[in-house]
Image: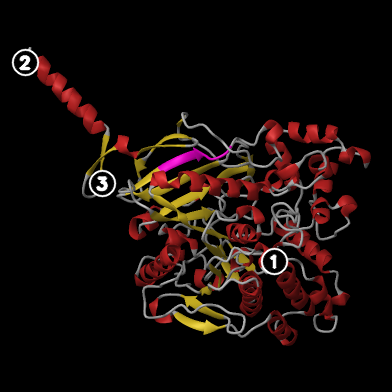
Amino acid sequence: MGLSMNRIKIAALLIVLASCVATDDKIIDIETLKVGMSTGIVQGYISDSAADVVAWDDIPFAQPPVGDLRWRATRPLTAANQIIRSKDDTACVQKASDYGGVSGEGILGSEDCLYLDVKAPADFKDKSYPVMFWIHGGGNTTGLKDFYDYSRLVALKDVVVVSTNYRLGGLGWFSHPAIQNHQEGEDKSTNFGTLDIIESLKWVQTNISKFGGNPDNVTIFGESAGGHNVYALLASPMSDGLFHKAISQSGYTTSHSLEDAHNRDGGNPLVERGSWQIVESINDFNVEQHDSEILANQLRGMDAREFIGLYYHKESIDSIPLTTRDGIVIPEIGLLAALGNRKFAKNVPVMAGATKDEVSLWHGLHRYFMETDYRFTKLLPPVITIKSPELFDVWVRTRSHAWKLRGVDIPLSAMESAGYEELFAYRFDWDHQKSSMFADFPSILGAAHGTDIAFVTGQYTYGPISSYIYPDGPARDEMEQTVMSAWSSFSSSATPDTGSLVQWNAFGSAVPAFIHLDKNDLLRMDIETESMDSLLGAISDDPVATDLEKCLIVWESLINVGDPDLGAFRNWNNGFCDKFDVRQEQKDIQERLIGEFGSIGVG
């Protein structure tokens, strides 16, 4: 009898221990990590990446946008009693991409994807930490919340981080009369992905205090398309009061008119995948059918992956029309103009920046610039070298500087004119990589697009070349300390503090100050001296680029990162580029490379 009782006691003790988890300095009952909120009950767990950090995964923040809810405004979800279980895959429908975090082939993901994750310090109970709300990048066509792990930032800087999904591509942004002409109110919007982000911010306002976050101190931050979406939220009249600071990393201000997003009969030659062209690729509809509920029902009835696949039936050099001036989510005057309009101003502190070598992520993998040589064996990667280092340098340097001007300085100047008073600019310069026998990564990639994210997360991943891009050592450690300190201090107090003696001065159009973010001995303040006119004016005298290459550089600089400035292109250097059909030249280059190598990329 005594032996049996001892076994019962031991079993009971094991059950109790199984319901607990150890952190670095204490035992936590996992029941205390369970949180109830407006959209369900979710069990937290100690993060695998950092001790003393609790994670809650795959929390639904809205009704799934499926069936009749496809291409409608995000619907709130009230389901306080549902038990939330983690999911194997929450990716929204998208083309597979290792860079976006969704590996595989073809079109993957599901429409049932409106979920978010929360990470907080383990002592979150009864706390009120600053909230950092992450919006992933991926061109608004790829990406997902799970690709980024902010556990280290949470552990080191005592912040709560929320990462959200949102509808992507043609399911997240779609303008077609068959849809909008038969809907009312917010459903007439064309910016469904933006509405998803807004709904997730509403979820934060309602629920984040349960996770130790302060709903009155929310900083939105995102990179690339995420930085663009930060600008969209700053411009949108529908996001008022939902956040209190904003950080745009490598963002851009492109927005499309409803007419261009539809692009009936191909009226805008810069748009090859407007909704008119997508619908035409399904069936040969006549004009009347293009505005019919029959078509709307057919579109809603299509398999979501099949629909997104329509955008990738052939190689294209255009960008899919996404953020649209619908007059509901984004003002009709356009994204950039709205940032400069006091009527829409949020008057919150804003930080924005770009990387020194933004476009090397694409140009450094492009066969136009790179030579590949399987000098060892085709079982190993090829040796990649730059065909013309001088041409590559001027192209990357000009295009990346143009990204800073059009994606940072011009938007911040617009916000200043709208009354914003706390504005901060940066350029991310860190490029202390190491070379391999296959590539000189510092020269080819450098401070490429997206290389800054790792210093906010503390997760140093860049695919199979991570150890070369982020070699362990003092330069990496110093950069992490600088970036994490600046981002977290901005989120808590609206002043970016790098943790050094270098003071980060505010940006102003009269004195466009910015900081060079780099390892300690290269960290410094500077003043922007270039304008788009002066930057592109220098191209005319470049001794390396051909006449066509000069026009391609100028075209790329004026068409990307913001609304296409065709007037400036036509006027550049007294109409110097009139002799070229630049779009056709781009297509010819692409076709030639595909014909010779099978693709335009070296990967």
Q: Position of residue 140 (x, y in %)?
A: 64, 52
Nearest-to-viewer mark from 2 and 1: 1
What amino acid type should be assigned to the residue bearing mark 3? Thr
What residue is pinned by disc 1? 336
Asked whether the viewer can see residue 603, the reply is: no
Tell whether 146 sits left or right of 292: left
Toward the left, the furthest residue is: 2
At 71% across and 40% down in the image, what residue appears? 71
Disc 3 packing (10 Å; few <14; some 14–19; many ≥20):
some
Position of the C terminus, as image quadrant, is bottom right
At 85% across and 69% down in the image, what residue appears? 581
The tag earlier along the polypeptide, 2 or 1, is: 2
Disc 1 packing (10 Å; few <14; some 14–19; many ≥20):
many
What residue is pinned by disc 2? 2
* Residue in front for this viewpoint, 32 or 19: 32
Nearest-to-viewer mark from 1 and 3: 1
Q: Position of residue 147 (x, y in %)?
A: 50, 49
The tag earlier along the polypeptide, 3 or 2, is: 2
Count of marks placed on residues:
3
What amino acid type should be assigned to the residue bearing mark 1? Leu
Query: Helix, strand, or loop for circle 2?
Result: helix
> Which of the 4 image quadrants contains residue 443?
bottom right
- Disc 2 versus disc 1: distance between alpha carbons? 78 Å
* Residue in front for this viewpoint, 541 or 148: 148
What amino acid type should be assigned to the residue bearing mark 2? Gly
Q: Main secondary structure of the magenta part?
A: strand
- Disc 1 versus disc 3: distance between alpha carbons? 47 Å
> Please, is residue 140 above or below residue 489 in the view?
above
Residue 59: in magenta span: yes
Magenta residues span: 56-62
What residue is pinned by disc 3? 23
